[in-house]
Image (tube, rainbow, N blue to C red):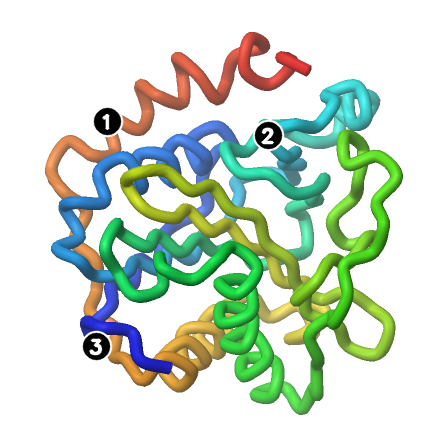
Amino acid sequence: MGTGNKTWLLWKDADRPSALNMALDELLLAKSERLDGRILLRLYGWDRPSISIGYTQHYSSVSDESGKYSIVRRPTGGGIVFHDRDLTYTVVVPAGHDIEALDRIESYHVFHRAVLLAMKKFGLEGRLASDAPVVQDRAVMRCFVTPTKYDVLCGNRKMAGAAQRRTKKGILHQGSISLEVSEGDRAALAAALASGFEREFNIKFQDFTVPDGFLDEAALLAFAKFATDGWNKSR
C-alpha cells in the first residue's frame, strides 16, 4: 500500500502504569505535528494486570475486578480489554497522511493486514472478520469475545482487535494482540508486528527519540485525568 513517507517511527516502550499508558497515547496524538508527517508505532506493556475500557463504556461492568486489575478508560472506543496476556500497540497517524484519508473501517483493514503478516511468523493463518455483528450493548462489550468487522480471527477465535479516535490532529489507533499467537513470547510478537508493518506498508522504521519533557508532561496528564475517578467512572 502507498503510504507517503516511507520512514515511520518505532517506539519500543517499557511496561508502564495504566493511566500513564493512556496519557502517553493521548499526548502523542495531541502533539502529532512533532512527527513531521511520519506515522509512529508504539509497542508497550503494563506494569501490572490491567483492564482498559472503551470511551463510552460503563465502569460498573468491570468494577468488581478492581482488586485484581488496574482499570483505566481509554480515549478510544471499543470493548473491554484484559491486559494480562496481550501485546498492546498504538499507531499515531498525523493529519495529512495518506492513511488519514481512509474511512475508519478501511483503516482497521490495512492495519490488521499487518497483524496477519505477524501471525504468519508463528505459522498461523489468520483471517479478517468479514461482517460486523449486531452488538446488543456496546457499553459492556468485551473485546476478545465480540469480533467486529476486520478484527483478526484464527479459526473462530478473535486474536486481535483495535479502537480509534480521530481528531483534527490525526488518528489514534490502539490495538491488542493475544499472546496465544506467539505462545506467550511478547518480545517475539513485538518484533513480528514491526516486521509485518514494514512489509504491509513498504516502509522502514527509525527509532523514535522521546522529546525532552514529554514523559513529565504525560505523567501530569495521567495524574490529572486518566488516574481519576472523574474520568474512569464517568459512565
Identify the residue at image location x=29%, y=74%.
3
Instruction: Looking at the picture, tell me which residue is in the foreground, 52 or 107.
Output: 107
Cα–Cα span, label 3 and label 2: 32 Å
Q: Which residue is mark 1?
A: 216
Measured in 3D between alpha carbons, the distance from the residue under mark 1 to the one under mark 2, in whole angstroms, is: 24 Å
Q: Work out how far the residue at label 1 is from the one at label 3, CA to CA, in angstroms.
A: 30 Å
Considering the numbered disc 2 on the image, is that residue within a helix, a strand or a loop?
Answer: loop
Residue 151 as seen in the image, left or right of residue 98: right
Q: Quadrant of residue 99?
A: bottom left
Q: Which residue is mark 3?
A: 6
Q: Quadrant of the C terminus?
A: top right
Identified by mark 1, the residue type is Asp
How many numbered discs, if any? 3
Tags 3 and 2 in contact by the CB under 8 Å rule?
no
Q: Secondary structure at mark 1?
A: helix
Residue 87 lies left or right of residue 13; in this view the side is: right
Crowd band around label 3 with a 10 angstrom C-alpha radius: few (<14), some (14–19), many (20+) = some
Q: Earlier in the sequence, mark 1 or mark 2?
A: 2
Residue 55: which disc? 2
**Residue in the image at 21% along x and 77% along y:** 6
To which quarter of the image does residue 153 belong?
Answer: bottom right
Q: Residue at x 86, y 72 (%)?
A: 156
On the image, the x and y values in percent for residue 169 come to 28, 41
How crowded is the residue under tag 2: few (<14 C-alpha within 10 Å), some, or many (20+)?
A: many
Above-or-below relation of 31 to 84: above
Looking at numbered disc 2 in the image, what kind of residue is underneath it?
Tyr
Q: Quadrant of the N terminus?
A: bottom left
The percent coordinates of residue 200 (x first, y second) are: 42, 82
Whichever of callouts 1 and 3 sits on the residue coming sooner in the sequence is 3
Disc 3 secondary structure class: loop
User: Which residue is at a point 61% across and 81% down the rendered structure image?
Assistant: 119
